[in-house]
Image (spheres, rainbow, N blue to C red):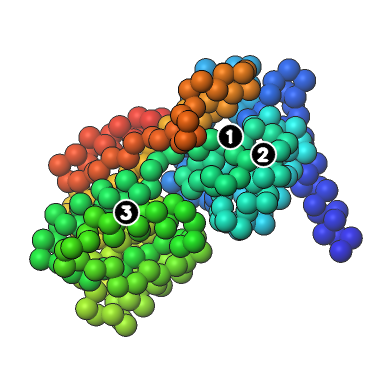
Amino acid sequence: MRNVVVVGLATALLVATALGANAADKKTLVFVPNGASDFWKAAEAGVKKAQEELPNYDLQFKYPEQSAAAVQERLMDDLVAAGAAGIIVSAVDPKTESDALNRIGSHTLLLTTDSDAPKTSREAYIGSSNVLAGNQVGELLKKAMPNGGKCMAYVGLPGADNARERIEGIKETIKGTKIEIVDIRADDIDQSRAKRNVEDTLTANPDINCMLGIYSYNIPQIYQALKEAGALGKITVTGFDDDPITLGGIKEGTVAGTVVQQPYEWGYQGMKAMAKILEGDKSFIPANKLMIIPTKTVEKSNVDEYAAQLKKLQGK
């Protein structure tokens, strides 16, 4: 127990040291994602861009060591203890983290992103409408499978609002068609497990002719599993986000399309929003406290244009 306490104190000290370099004259704002993923690189780029325009603030991006609610909560507690003036968080599990989010929000400015927690003390949400994004994936499915089909969906955290709302949006759009979501397989943001879920489907559910990737890494893992099984192009694949493998699959025609969010804007606009709020301006926040960043549909016809734009945003 003593060792655990020492490690906890050491972690808090490291966070305090990291935040404290400019504490005397700059307020620190931190973006905390739900886990390590290439998806968040665009958000990092957005935070970096915002830093150029907010020289009086210290903007940081902090990954939790593990995609677990307890780990993320501990990180945020450490950030608050170190004096962070504001935090934007993509909560691992908003429902189980409500008490923690209320605690954090009572001590510092708190915004949510990616997956909202409306019943907490967060000031506002900035991100996509996951239901509308799901509607767009549903339209992709209707276009790719006019005669219907059986789909398996894959997701990291099925209980998270972003996952639930995306699936809700898809089901809403395909209602009345012959397209069916047979089941949903979770992987707890474990990419090896995500791939095994696809492999298990190929063995146990040979009637599945459609696979949906709900989180950013799911389509890439679907792609890899299908490629190894010699099934690329035989199963309709679609879903969310702009992993390079996903965009490559769209270009070659093995992925029907994807609906992309704009995490760059979450980082960029989110940091600027926090600065405004701290400076006393809340006039830009809608009455429902939802600052929605539109999602886009990427298909073969516009994938090259989108990929070039994404590289530019990421500074590549």
Asked where in the image residue 315 lies, by quadrant, the reply is top left
Residue positioned 85% across, 53% down in the render: 6
Q: Residues within 10 Å of mark 2 (few under 14, many from 20)?
A: some
What residue do we see at 30% from left, 32% from top? 309
Quadrant in which the N terminus appears = bottom right
User: Badge 3 local density, few (<14 within 10 Å), some, or many (20+)?
Assistant: many
- Element under label 1? loop
Residue 295 placement (x, y as % from top left): 32, 40
Left/right placement of residue 277 relative to residue 250 reads: right
Disc 3/disc 1 C-alpha distance (Å): 25 Å
Height in image: 153 above or below 283?
Answer: below
Where disc 3 sits, the SS reads helix
Query: Can you tell which mark lies on residue 169?
Result: 3
Q: Quadrant of the C terminus?
A: top left
Question: Which sits earlier in the primary sequence, circle 2 or circle 3?
Answer: 2
Residue 105, numbered circle: 2
**Disc 2 from disc 3: Cα separation:** 29 Å
